Image (cartoon, rainbow, N blue to C red):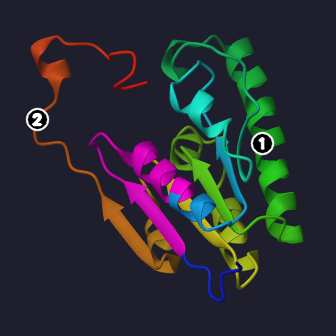
Amino acid sequence: MKLKKGLVQIYTGDGKGKTTAAIGQGIRSAGYGLNVVMVQFLKGGYTGELSTIDKIDNFNIFRFEKERDFVWNLSKAEIEELKKEIRTGYEFIKKIVDEGSCDVLIIDEIMGAHYNKFISTDEIIYLIKNKKESMEIVLTGRNVPMEVIDLADLVTEMKMIKHPFEKGIGAREGIEY
């Protein structure tokens, strides 16, 4: 199967579920035989979906960063190292877009990389404007620039109404990661 018309989807907002929605889309697409590539930014640690997706031949996840603390807790040297890793990831994505080497490209937390000034708005726009007609692109993360929203075909906002963190319940293995 090949998509006739690939669109641009964005999952954003302060609520839980952006990555989960993107992975769900990827699993659905893979189930129809589409080749899915997911690149994750700002995520270096193990998450449960990695072992499940590893069993799906046509759904591959790539990470270019080593595991580390949140950006706001990093030293200047660690931030410089992170910038280089993110740059490597972006160049990998750019090559996929330029070659059209997958059907569905999920770029998880690209907006987080943008918010932290590791990737520019123009670089995100480049990916959207240069994708092949048959490629679907799914972008996730908070704080999406309006110029990117304007180019998207679907934008879904996950809005937090209530969260267990407010009760002092931290992230749980198998649920949040």
Range of magenta residues: 8-27
Left or right: residue 156 compared with residue 96: left
* Quadrant (top left, top right, bottom left, bottom right) of the N terminus: bottom right
Left or right: residue 73 compared with residue 130: left
Question: Local crowd at mark 2 within 10 Å, few (<14), some, or many (≥20)?
Answer: few
Amino acid at pointer 1: Gly
Left or right: residue 163 compared with residue 36: left
Residue 13 is situated, as x and y percent measured from the top left of the image, at: 31, 50
Residue 134 is situated, as x and y percent measured from the top left of the image, at: 70, 82
Please state which of residues 17 and 150 is positioned toward the viewer in this rendering.
Answer: 17
Residue 142 appears in view = no
Pointer 2 residue: 162
* Residue 147 included in the magenta stretch of the image: no
Task: State the SS at label 2.
Answer: loop
* Quadrant (top left, top right, bottom left, bottom right) of the C terminus: top left
Left or right: residue 139 compared with residue 98: left
